Image (cartoon, grey):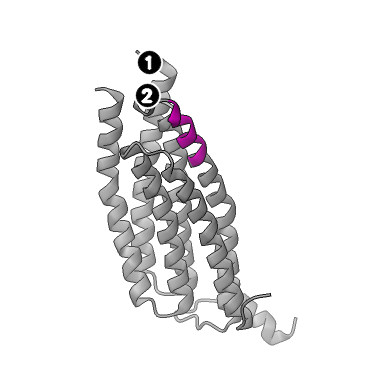
């Protein structure tokens, strides 16, 4: 016998996990198909935040209802929550540093629409 | 349906989708034209392996696997920042 709150948490967690799987598939397809590094960065962020952080929050909610794990489910829930927090904090910082390093190392932007930073550097601002 | 069967069915349904995504990231790592592309794909793959490890921890009922996931997430951030530093200054360390 288990309560209504655990049931609600279980179903919310399952929905979050499925949404995360969908986001991850879309991010992987975008990373494979987009033409250039700075566009691929967008798809990669969809794949990281939507594909790893959201499902970890869903896993946190889902493990609250996993009675078959016994006492250890609290370790699983707190570990998943901390991992999701670490991903949410560090993944944008890492992607930003990578984009800055790639631009300053002179990576060619192949199908270029507009590049305001290059124009500003050319004007000497 | 009991909780254990439902949770394990969800995990078994979700795992092939993540396996397909990991295969696509691996293709991008192998054929990526420049170094930042490869580093970005390794980032995505590592964070996905984090979540995969958490799923395996529930499926095999071995909760200590989650400790490895935390360490992997931190390592991935350090890897990304290190690659960025190398790209910008062409040197490592300090």
- The quadrant of the image that shows the C terminus of chain B is bottom right
CB under 8 Å between discs 1 and 2 = yes
- Label 1 chain ID: A
Number of the front mark, 1 or 2: 2
Residue bearing mark 1: A2
Quadrant in the rendering for residue B22: bottom left
Residue, x 38% and y 48% (percent of image)? B53
Farthest residue in the top direction?
A1
Residue bearing mark 2: A67
Reply yes or no: does residue A73 show up in magenta.
Answer: yes
Task: Provide the residue span drawn in magenta.
Answer: A71-79
Q: Who is closer to the viewer here, B14 or A32?
A: B14
- Which class describes the residues within 10 Å of circle 2: few (<14), some (14-19), or many (20+)? some
- Label 2 chain ID: A
- The quadrant of the image that shows the N terminus of chain B is top left
Q: Horizontal and vertical percent for residue A28?
A: 36, 60
Q: Horizontal and vertical percent for residue B11?
A: 30, 40
Q: Is residue B65 left or right of residue B7?
A: right
Farthest residue in the right direction?
A125
């Amino acid at each position: 016998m288990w309560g209504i709150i655990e049931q609600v948490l279980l179903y919310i967690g399952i929905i979050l996990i499925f949404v995360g799987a969908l986001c991850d598939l879309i991010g992987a397809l975008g990373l494979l198909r987009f033409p250039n590094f700075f566009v691929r960065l967008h798809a990669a962020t969809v794949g990281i935040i939507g594909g790893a952080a959201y499902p970890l929050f869903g896993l946190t909610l889902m493990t609250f209802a996993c009675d078959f794990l016994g006492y250890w489910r609290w370790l699983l829930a707190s570990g998943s929550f901390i991992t999701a927090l670490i991903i949410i904090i560090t993944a944008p910082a890492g992607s930003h540093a990578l984009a800055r390093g790639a631009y300053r190392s002179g990576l060619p932007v192949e199908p270029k629409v507009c590049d305001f930073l290059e124009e500003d550097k050319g004007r000497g601002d | 349906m009991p909780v254990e069967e439902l949770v394990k069915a969800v995990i078994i349904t979700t795992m092939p989708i993540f396996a397909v995504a990991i295969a696509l990231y691996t293709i991008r790592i192998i054929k990526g034209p420049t170094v930042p592309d490869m580093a970005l794909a390794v980032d995505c793959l590592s964070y996905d392996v984090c979540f995969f490890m958490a799923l395996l921890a529930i499926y095999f009922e071995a909760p200590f696997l989650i400790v490895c996931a935390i360490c992997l997430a931190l390592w991935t951030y350090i890897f990304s920042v290190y690659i960025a530093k190398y790209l910008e200054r062409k040197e490592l360390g300090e």
